[in-house]
C-alpha cells in the first residue's frame, strides 16, 4: 500500500492533547519520523500504535503510516485528562 505522512501540530498553548489514528477501536501502526520539523536519526525510528496520550503544546510530529486496506479510519483528539468524547475526524483510505 501507499505510505502517508502526516504533520501533527498542537497549536494549543495551554493543554496537553491525546491524539490517535484508529481503525474502528484499534489504533493503526505509525512511525514518528520527525519532531519539531527535524527528521529523526535512523536509530530512533520505530513503529508503534498510533496513540499519543501527552501531545504537548507547541509540539510538532511527523508520522508515517501505511494502511493495510481501503476503508474508513478515524483521527481522534481530545484535551488529555478531561472527561468527554474526543473530536473525531473521518479519513477515507482508497
Image (spheres, grey):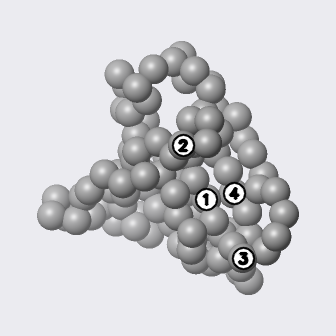
Q: Earlier in the sequence, mark 4 or mark 2?
A: 2
Q: In the rendered structure, find residue 81 and report the number of the disc placed on it.
A: 3
Q: Return the residue nearer the eye: 48 or 57.
A: 48
The 10 Å Cα crowd at callout 4, few under 14, some 14 to 19, many 20 or more, is many
In the displayed orientation, state which residue is furthest to the bottom. 14
Q: CA distance from mark 3 to mark 2?
A: 20 Å
Q: Which residue is identified by label 1?
A: 19
Point out residue 55 in the picture as x, y percentages from the top left corner. Answer: 57, 71
Distance in Å between CA atoms under marks 4 and 2: 15 Å
Could you tell me how far apart the alpha carbons at marks 1 and 2 are, in whole angstroms?
A: 13 Å
Instruction: Judge from the rendering whether residue 42 lies leftward or rightward of residue 13; answer left or right.
Output: left
Q: Earlier in the sequence, mark 1 or mark 2?
A: 1
Q: Nearer the viewer, mark 4 or mark 2?
A: 2
Asked if residue 12 can be seen in this view, the reply is: no
Q: Are marks 4 and 3 in contact (CB under 8 Å)?
A: no
Can you say whether 15 is above or below 11 in the image? below
Q: Which residue is mark 4?
A: 77
Q: Residue at x 61, y 59 (%)?
A: 19
- The residue that mark 2 highlights is 26
Q: Quadrant of the C terminus?
A: top right
Residue drawn at x 82%, y 70% is 83
Amino acid at each position: 500500500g501507499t505510505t502517508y505522512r502526516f504533520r501533527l501540530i498542537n497549536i494549543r498553548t495551554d493543554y496537553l492533547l491525546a491524539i490517535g489514528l484508529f481503525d474502528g477501536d484499534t489504533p493503526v501502526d505509525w512511525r514518528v519520523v520527525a519532531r519539531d520539523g527535524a527528521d529523526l536519526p535512523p536509530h530512533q525510528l520505530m513503529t508503534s500504535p498510533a496513540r499519543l496520550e501527552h501531545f504537548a503544546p507547541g509540539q510538532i510530529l511527523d508520522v508515517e503510516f501505511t494502511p493495510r486496506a481501503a476503508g474508513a479510519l478515524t483521527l481522534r483528539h481530545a484535551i488529555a485528562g478531561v472527561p468527554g468524547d474526543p473530536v473525531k475526524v473521518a479519513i477515507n483510505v482508497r
